Image (tube, grey):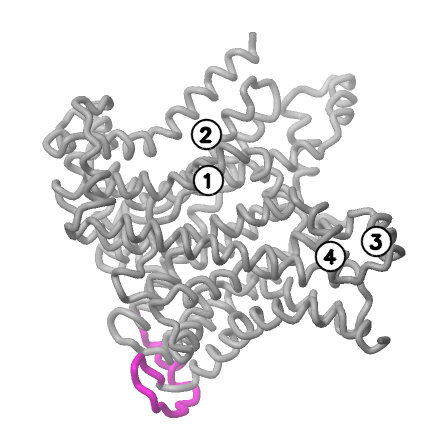
Amino acid sequence: MRRRGALTPYLFLLPGLLLFGVFRLYPLLDGLRLSFTNARLGRPQYAWVGLANYERLLDDTRFHASLWNTAFYTLASTLPILAIPLALALALHRGVRLTTLLRGAFFFPFTLSVVTVGLTWLWLLDPVIGPFSYYLRALGIPVRPWLADPATAMWAIILTTVWWVAGYYLVVYLAGLQDIPRELYEAAALDGAGGWTSFWAITLPLLRPVLLFVFVTHIIGSFQIFGQVFILTQGGPGDATRTVVQHLYETAFQNFFHFGSASAMAWVLFAVIVGFSLLQFRLLRGHTEY
Amino acid sequence: MRRGALTTVMLALAVLWLTPALWVLVTSLKQTPDIIRTPPEWIPWPATLGHYHEVLLSSSRTARIGRAFLNSAIVSVGATLIVVFVSAMAAYPLARMRFAGRDLIFGLLIGSLMIPNAVVLVPQYVLTQRLGWLSTYQGLIVPEAAMTFAFGVFLLRQFFLTMPRELEDAARIDGAGPWQIFLRVVLPLSQPVLGALAIFAFRSAWNDFLWPLIAVNKPDMFPLPVALALLRGAYSAESYGPIMAGAALSALPLLVVFLVANRRIVEGVRLGGLKG
């Protein structure tokens, strides 16, 4: 009887841990093992090759381009992703009617799949018959083949992403804003502080944990960007928008079926993400401690 | 006065924000020759449901959408049921019982939230192949559930911790075992958060693209995002209509969920997002 009681928590945990262990933990570690082999799709036998896959990545110019593109995407998208939803949230938080309706309108794109979002913008940005180009032309702004031009393709992907996810971050910000006590603003107003002053002195500092959350979530997500690229550009033109996961997908499942080197890429990506997360937490935690 | 002005500006912005989605809907209702006409026409007249008919019912190459819709529904409902039930079972002892290894297990689950799906892609494919699960429902359902499980545990444990213990104690005094308490007391009291998790899990599974893209190679088994993405290759004047009809259909289930449970979704984002 006593033994049965002691086992109870483990019995509750069993299905979950089985699911987690077999389909999450084991693949993670198996990927590390595969990265030291020359495994290929459909080849049952493969050999240990040591660090060969990682050494090859040092010479793989396409991998370097994909790292650079991913970094560029991450850097260029961070400011719009942090600022646009924040501006919308501030407007919705104070002094607006119909908050629920408006919030719903901005949130809606986030309920769509990346494929639906990608197809939507592919159609909108069409240089010949897409409305985006039509109206720009009507305004006298020169039109380019946005997705086929290396100078604009990545920006088109960023625009698409902002439209897709801004509503989610808007809701996150709104929740954070609601947790800031009203009295602080009232006290500040009594002291004669205007809108801008209280934004810099109250809102922004108290929103720091939320900003950190948005920042970290966005960066981790950005390193893994794939669907938008796959639908909008397939990594082109040339290598202009080929990101790490797009390259990984092509290496493993489209062109070379080389599981070993794809796994090495996956672990480089993982290391970058973990390293970056730890760095961010350290840097930003240091700031929040008073 | 200022309030009215700001509301007007925000309303205009919201309309602008929804324009891309509206354009998809309008296109899907137009007759094929009208679709590529410029200047863009925002009223689909004469309107037609022909593209919807084609993707759902005909046997042309764009017609896998109907089947894909069914596949997506089966996979998403299956994954959601597993996630909700298995996460609740795991979160309950983590919130309420003392046992060896509890903190280690919880730490491992939280740490795993940082594992990018792309990193386990290849080994998960190898595993699924070895199980003989490629192009099967279980090959989609179980990995999708595994992706959301840790988040579910995190969300539910948080909620269980805030639940008053009195009801559970009362049930225990009445002679109920832990399993009965879990089923009869804890789960019914947790309906709002279970609902939020169900929506989250459904959205993840319904919209996931990368895993089904590689785990399925039989057209009959494609879920919606993959079926739609492969239509992209067929992009031409004749297929804009069907593609946009497919895109609109793929948005429908979550739109309905969203309209019904707007508040709950927001609450879910709040619970799950901010306590991380």
Q: Which residue is mark 1?
A: A80
On the image, the x and y values in percent for residue B36 come to 14, 33
The residue at the point 56 percent across, 69 percent down is: A19
Callout 3–callout 4 Cβ contact below 8 Å? no
Residue holding disc 2: A105
Q: Nearer the viewer, mark 2 or mark 3?
A: 3
| Rendered image quadrant of residue B104 | bottom right
Q: Are marks 2 and 4 in contact (CB under 8 Å)?
A: no
10 Å crowding of disc 1: few (<14), some (14-19), many (20+): some
Rendering coords of residue A249 (x, y %): 33, 66
Of tags 2 and 4, the one toward the viewer is 4
How far apart in space, not on screen, are marks 2 and 4 (Cα)? 38 Å
Residue identified by numbered label 3: B171
Q: Please identify, in this view, whether the residue under mark 3 or under mark 4 is nearer the observer.
A: 3
Task: Return the chain for callout 2.
Answer: A
Viewer-side residue, B97 vs B121: B97
Mark 1 vs 4: CB contact within 8 A: no
Mark 3 and mark 1: Cα distance apart in space? 52 Å
For the record, the magenta segment spans: A39-61
Give the class, few, some or many, for how many residues have Cα within 10 Å of label 4's Cα (few <14, many ≥20).
some
Judged left or right of residue A75, residue A146 is: left
Q: CA distance from mark 3 to mark 4?
A: 10 Å
Residue toward you, B72 or A28: B72
Comparing A188 with B213, the one in front is: B213
Task: Give the structural element (helix, strand or loop) at label 3.
Answer: helix
- Label disc, if present, on residue B182 of the rendered structure: 4
User: Residue at the location (65% across, 37% down)?
Assistant: A176
Name the spot of residue B90 as percent of width and height, x first: 67, 63
Q: Could you tell me the amino acid type at mark 3? A: Ala
Disc 3: host chain? B
